[in-house]
Image (tube, helix red, strand yellow):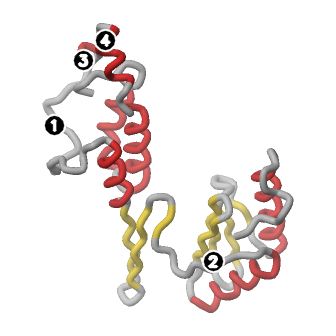
Amino acid sequence: MEQPEGLYGLKQAPRVWFRLLKDHLECEGYTLMNCEACVAVKIDIWLVFISIYVDDLILFAPNKVITKQMKATLHRRFEMKDLGPIHYILGWEITRNRSERTVFISQRQYAEKVLRRCDMENCNGCKVPCSPELKLSKVMCPTTREKTLLMEKKPYRSVIGSLMYLMLGTRPDLAYVVRECSQFLNNPGILH
């Protein structure tokens, strides 16, 4: 969706834009969820949702006719591009099989990007996120200034953040490893 002219570059632009969109959706009968303000829901004959991420909207409706009506409502107020069915957003790949009525969500490309960033794209895969025998501890933290400076050049915090994004999205099996490694954000060692 295109933000109205005059909003770009202003300090309050994101707030004004969200308020404008929110007011329009509420006029059309949508309610923003209390637990997640970026999801609008409308209960009419059908239950429909709009997921909001900055100026990208994802529409969820039971059929194409309702989706078309939702788009028309938004087009009346905002200049927007229809990018068709969703395939990729925020590092998530979405594959839909209408005949089987299934949706498959993956973060494969995002995970591969994280591996490339860490120069690990050729690493060997494993069946579990970490060895059960491995116990991380403070003893593994650098004790000399030289080792600390060496580790400061590593993107440890960034990698933990990326792993957390994967964990929250499609890889809950990473939760234990992320929790363990997160304890050493201030002074990670080579083994961490």
**Sooner in the amino-acid sequence: mark 4 or mark 2:** 2
Image location (x, y in percent) of residue 116: 31, 48
Q: CA distance from mark 4 to mark 1?
A: 29 Å
**Residue at image mark 2:** 47
Disc number lying in front (4 or 1): 4
Q: Upstream in the sequence, badge 2 or badge 3?
A: 2
- Label 2 SS: strand
Q: Quadrant of residue 61?
A: bottom right
The residue wearing badge 3 is: 140
Residue at image position (63%, 84%) is 67
Marks 3/4: CA–CA distance? 15 Å
Marks 2 and 1: in contact by CB < 8 Å? Answer: no
Point out the tag, 4 or 1, that comes first from the N-terminus.
Answer: 1
Q: Residue at x 23, y 44 (%)?
A: 129
For marks 1 and 2 on the same chain, the one whose residue lies earlier in the sequence: 2
Q: Amino acid at mark 4?
A: Glu
Residue situated in front as seen by the camera: 37 or 71:
71
What is the number of the mark on residue 146? 4
Q: Mark 3 or mark 4, which is nearer to you?
A: 4
Indicate which label's residue lies in the foreground, 2 or 3. Answer: 3
Residue depicted at x 34% and y 15%: 148
Q: Give the side of residue 62 with respect to residue 113, left or right.
A: right
SS state under label 3: helix
Q: Relative to 72, is 49 on the left or the right?
A: left
Provide the residue designation for mark 1. 131
